[in-house]
Image: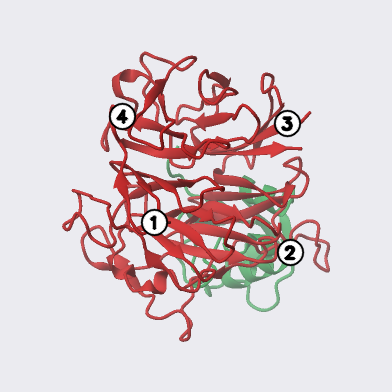
Chain colours: A red, B green
Amino acid sequence: MSGVRILIGTRKGGFVLTADGKRKRWEVSGPHFAGWEIYHMKGSPADPSRLYASQTSGWFGQVIQRSSDGGKTWEPPGGPLEKGPEGFPKGESNKFVYDTSPGTGQPLTTHQWYDGTQHPWEFKRVWHLEPSLTDPDTLYAGVEDAALFQSVDGGKTWQELAGLRGHGSGPQWAPGAGGMCLHTILLDPGNPKRMFIAISSAGAFRTDDAGNTWKPINRGLHSQYIPDPTAEVGHCVHRIAMHGSHPNVLFMQKHWDVLRSDDAGDSWHEVSGNLPTDFGFVIDVHAHEPETVYVVPIKSDSEHYPPDGKLRVYRSRTGGNQWEPLTKGLPQRDCYVNVLRDAMAVDTLDPCGVYFGTTGGQVYGSADAGDSWAPIVRDLPAVLSVEVQTLP
Amino acid sequence: MIRVLLPAHLKTLAQVNGEVELEVHGPVTQRSVLDALEGRYRVLRGTIRDHVTLGRRPLVRFFACSEDWSHEPPDTPLPPAIATGQEPLLILGAIAGG
């Protein structure tokens, strides 16, 4: 019987949850990297045993970890399994240096700071790791301050895809409250040269030439909190989602507004419809129904918890506009947690499983596409990210 | 031998227990000790000092002989007790946050 592995990143470590295809009984392993912030963990679609994790700390910086056995053991790439002459780990996988070379790194100098002045790019952490769809050793990293890096050697070394910051709008990018982070990376399964990314607070961008050049794809976004509400860049995009079979259809949860694009981001229109609030962070798409979309409405930009103290996932089976609350098994009183942007994922079993984690440390799962929910774990540290692997 | 005591998280990362003993050639300074440490445990590069500037990370501290050496220039010779291995150089995370 097939199974499911959930990779949970939290404020104080990583956790791996596993179950068989019934998704009733779960085994919990962790904390891995105890005490460190695990911003994101993700498995390779090309090799389910190959996992990557972003391990970060305000004290000790960034470390990339890699597992080749489905999360049982971990190592910094180039680490313990490749000893130096003295037999000690020689991994150096935590080096993210912005491209400042004359050929490709100019004019990548500054971005807009909170006070309106220009501020140099400073690497802080990796928010999101996106393994290649076809090669376990190739992966992308979205980082703060916003930039995109690529590794083609399993995470040992990293090179910036500088064309993104070199687009020319970089001086207008500004940090949101959570920092200026590149948090979303979507790979087009039908076109290996096409990729989508999103940055808070710059917006969404697309490349059609494998990352060499990029274009902002924010037409149709309307943001009252920036001087020109329809500007080409400056929007606080919280998350983008795509169904692999319809890669030209994108769904976006923005700071406010839920939007949809039918032309690979060239234009967007709002599909918030009857949501109780269209602020939120996560958005995801059903594994088998490209027009079924999930969001978790959050009250407002200053009140990061569900409206009325009721934790509700909203599902649209019509690609937006018409939304239904999913409440069975979720707390419907006195609930004031948040669900962060990388903290929802779906499996590919039938029926589709849907999972999300909260800042209160709960991870909820649904084995029936959202009709009913149950907590898998209740008392983890604040959940930063949730990813799911469907195992053969 | 120079003795260095790492904070718990970096011990785990470098897979060491207890103190680290290092051979340092030339003057014993913060820079030379950290160069030797990172040369032997490359996984620690970037965790104590910035990769590019080699400046101390803001929330890392260096204590030697019960004194805070964090703000001393990196090429200032460390106390003789550190240079002779009588006392360890303490590297630790600053008290910050919860």
Tags 3 and 2 touching, CB below 8 Å: no
Which structural element holds mark 3? strand
**Residue at label 1?**
A265
**Residue at label 3?**
A3
Q: Is residue A357 left or right of residue A190?
A: left
Tags 3 and 4 touching, CB below 8 Å: no
Quadrant of the rendered image containing residue A17? top right
The answer to whether tags 1 and 4 share a subunit is yes
Q: Amino acid under label 1? A: Gly
Is B26 or A195 nearer to us in this picture? A195
Q: Position of residue A65 (x, y in %)?
A: 66, 52
Q: Position of residue B70 (x, y in %)?
A: 48, 61
Q: Amino acid under label 3? A: Gly
**Residue at label 2?**
A90
Q: Is residue A53 left or right of residue A373?
A: right
> Alpha carbon of mark 1 to alpha carbon of mark 2: how far?
42 Å
Q: Position of residue B65 (x, y in %)?
A: 57, 56
The answer to whether tags 3 and 4 share a subunit is yes
Q: Is residue A347 above or below residue A122?
A: above
**Residue at label 4?**
A275
Q: Earlier in the sequence, mark 4 or mark 2?
A: 2
Is A307 or B57 nearer to us in this picture? A307
Q: Earlier in the sequence, mark 1 or mark 3?
A: 3
Q: Chain of mark 3?
A: A
